[in-house]
Image: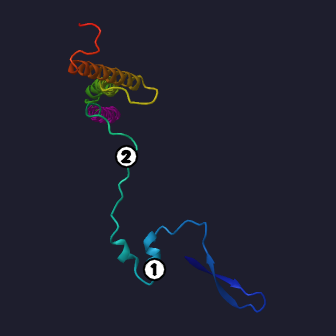
């Protein structure tokens, strides 16, 4: 898409219009990609953009927290919010010289202890969940090596069981001694 630019002619002082081509500049943000062609062809951009979805779903950047960890996190956030609210009320009561200041300060101290417990609860719950539900499988993970070893042992056992079944089917031929 070009833009019109004014320039002076070298000798006569008359103004001429020249079209300049945009190459490396950013595209117009207000015109959809399909809309440029529609505008050039004389159509409207709305006719083409009506088929576009309202939003495009993007994949999540991080995995969702496990349910127990998420529950502990929500609980901790609520406790911390109540603690901050109590601290603010205690401060305002103290500034106003209200009789409610002392009970609010005491409850704020208790709430601070409970909020600290809530934050630690999130951390402990996450650690316990990770420990119970395995290690994230990365190439250096010991969990992957253990699984690989177990699969190898299972395959060897299957091969040995098939060999024993084959010997039994042949009636014991080829066996040097009987168990």
Q: Which residue is mark 2?
A: 60
At a point 73% along the width and 87% down the height, the residue shown is 9
At a point 29% along the width and 29% down the height, the residue shown is 101
Q: Main secondary structure of the magenta part?
A: helix
What is the secondary structure assignment of the residue under circle 1? helix
At a point 41% along the width and 23% down the height, the residue shown is 145
Q: Earlier in the sequence, mark 1 or mark 2?
A: 1
What is the secondary structure assignment of the residue under circle 2? loop
Q: Which residue is mark 1?
A: 39
Residue lying farthest to the front in this orientation: 173
Q: Magenta segment range?
A: 70-96
Q: Residue 126 placed where, x, y %?
A: 33, 27
- Residue in the foreground of this view, choosing between 142 and 154: 154
The crowd level at tag 1 (other Cα within 10 Å; few <14, some 14-19, many 20+) is few
Q: CA distance from mark 1 to mark 2?
A: 35 Å
- Residue 87: name its quadrant: top left
- Residue in the foreground of this view, choosing between 6 and 39: 39
The answer to whether residue 174 shows anywhere in this view is yes
117 versus 86 height, above or below: above
């Amino acid at each position: 898409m070009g833009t019109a630019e004014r320039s002076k002619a070298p000798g006569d002082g008359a103004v001429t219009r020249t079209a300049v081509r945009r190459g490396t500049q950013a595209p117009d943000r207000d015109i959809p990609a399909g809309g440029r062609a529609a505008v050039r062809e004389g159509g409207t951009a709305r006719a083409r953009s009506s088929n576009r979805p309202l939003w495009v779903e993007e994949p999540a950047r991080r995995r969702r927290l496990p349910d127990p960890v998420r529950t502990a996190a929500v609980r901790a956030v609520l406790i911390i919010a109540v603690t901050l609210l109590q601290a603010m009320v205690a401060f305002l009561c103290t500034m106003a010289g209200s009789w409610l200041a002392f009970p609010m300060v005491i409850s704020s101290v208790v709430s601070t202890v409970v909020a600290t417990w809530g934050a630690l609860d999130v951390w402990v719950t996450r650690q316990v969940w990770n420990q119970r539900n395995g290690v994230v499988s990365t190439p250096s993970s010991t969990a992957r090596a253990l699984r690989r070893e177990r699969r190898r042992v299972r395959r060897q056992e299957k091969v040995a069981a098939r060999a024993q079944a084959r010997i039994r089917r042949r009636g014991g031929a080829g066996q040097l001694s009987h168990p």
